[in-house]
Amino acid sequence: MLGERGTTEITQTDNSQGFKKLKQDAFDGGTIAGDTKKALGKKTGKSISTNENYLEIPEKKQRLN
């Protein structure tokens, strides 16, 4: 969620247009989210994403085959 929100903010702030610029904004947003996740894990000494705290997709929202 942080990556998506960061990408949106970057795109709106820069008034980005065109595929190449939007792709770069998405990369930058993902990098910011990844760096934040690593920094939080390092600071707390805990893994941020684990099998124990992963939320499964509710059955009614799963994609039909």
Image: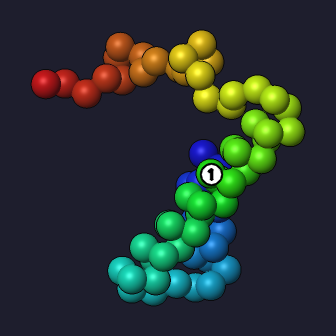
Query: Which class describes the residues within 10 Å of circle 1: few (<14), some (14-19), or many (20+)?
Result: some
The answer to whether residue 5 shows anywhere in this view is no
Tell me residue 59's x, y (percent). Answer: 35, 13
Q: Residue 42 versus residue 59: which sits nearer the camera?
A: 42
> Which residue does the numbered mark 1 point to in the structure image?
34
Q: Which quadrant of the structure image shows residue 53?
A: top right
Q: Residue 45 versus residue 2: which sits nearer the camera?
A: 45
**Residue at the location (79% across, 39% down)?**
42
Tell me residue 57's x, y (percent). Answer: 42, 21
The answer to whether residue 53 shows anywhere in this view is yes
| Type of colouring | rainbow
**Residue at the location (60% across, 61% down)?**
31
Q: What residue type is labelled 1?
A: Gly
Total numbered circles: 1
Q: What element carries label 1?
A: helix
Instruction: Specify the quadrant that holds the C terminus.
Output: top left
15 left or right of 56 in image: right
